[in-house]
Image (cartoon, grey):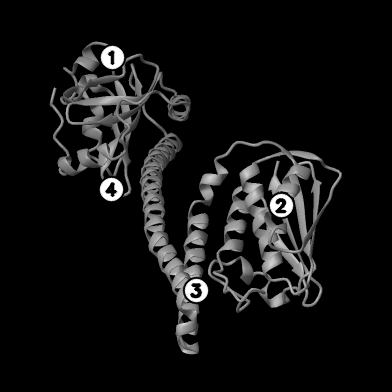
Amino acid sequence: MIAPNEHKYEKERLKNLDSYDILDTLQEVDYDNITAIAAEICNTPIALVTLLDDKRQWFKSHYGIDETETPKEFAFCAHAINDESNIFMIQDARTDNRFKNNPLVTGGPKIVFYAGVPLKSENGLPLGTLCVIDDKPNLLSKGQLKSLTALSKQVMNLLELRKSKSLLNITLSELEEKNQELERFAFIAAHDLKSPLINISSLAELFLEDYKLQIDTDGIELLEMIIKSSDNLKELINGLLDYSRSDVILKEQKSDLNLNKLISEIEGLFNFDHNLKLVLNSNLTQIEINKTALSHIIMNLVSNAIKYNDKPKVEIELDIFETPSHYEFYVKDNGPGIAAKNHSKIFNIFEKVANHDRFGREGNGIGLATVKKIVEKLEGQIKVVSELGNGATFIFTIKK
């Protein structure tokens, strides 16, 4: 018997093999199907998917034998990986000086015939083989050799897919960790920014109230600009927080929601400061849905309908229907409408199509982008139907 030589790039080969994280994993039906097909095509009792580390050959799939590994110095496959450009084939191991005293030949499984195709990764380094074994002399036809080669490529496809999936899971885990860190940072940063902004705004208002009669017109205007800018920046921070933390809303479980109660709560929030008529038109009285997400969507749309309305009394109709798979919502207002060219723009983050609302405040272009993000995460869609002078209808769906 002649022991196999180490591969000429053995160190790199072993590092490459480790990157697949495949050694000592459980049997998988996809690999077992390939060895069963290989044995059938080549008419042999044994077929193996072998992987060679520094001390052994380990069988990812073993058809026809119960063993799961053998020492590397006895492995036919350790010879096969050194002949990467060919199928390594031994017709009768009993007459071959390299194998005739090999324990795998003299004892079980009594290997006589062997044919192995190296399993080469994309960088050209072999991981092991797909091989077939017989206990009597044999010879494969060109068709059998071609099929065995094709099956070896399928084994590599499975290994590469496994590796890609593993790398993807690692990347997703890292991204999740970074997202959590970013969320914590955003919350802390927003809190730290909001506190001084509130102080600036409050102090400016207090100063203006106490010293208004002692300040000229330019001074009053500057103080009012400070208050307005502080308030705008607070709204921007709140909007960014809502957008970045919208995924948290989606984690809430679905529950029964009374629609009349929801409308009463929303109407109560806005009617204190605004002349609002909010009407629910629906045969549905109760739906099973993510309450927080739906409340956030509708409150945002109602708030926009109020802020950008040009009528003394804001009128909003909410229609709700259901299909076999989704709930469908219509939020219609009596405002000035939205030009067709802006229908898609309004859902882009930081996109603003109006210079200011009815109260003279500038928007931040985050609210509708947040709504769109939530709707799409709930496996729905949102759009606006509107023309200038005839109000706007926001239509969105949420999967049941």
Q: Amino acid at mark 4?
A: Gly
Report if residue 142 is visible in the image: no
Amino acid beneath label 2: Gly
On the image, which quarter does residue 17 sit in? top left
Label 1, secondary structure: give it: loop
| Between discs 3 and 4, the one toward the N terminus | 4
Rendered location of residue 241, percent (x, y)? 48, 56
Label 2 vs 4, first from the N-terminus: 4
Q: CA distance from mark 4 to mark 1?
A: 32 Å
Labelled disc at residue 209:
3
Q: Tag 4's secondary structure?
A: loop
Q: Amino acid at mark 3?
A: Glu
Residue 210 at x, y percent in the picture: 46, 74
How far apart are the alpha carbons under marks 3 and 2? 30 Å
Image point 64% across, 37% down: which residue? 254
Give the residue pinned by disc 4. Answer: 124
- Pointer 4 and pointer 1: residues touching (CB < 8 Å)? no
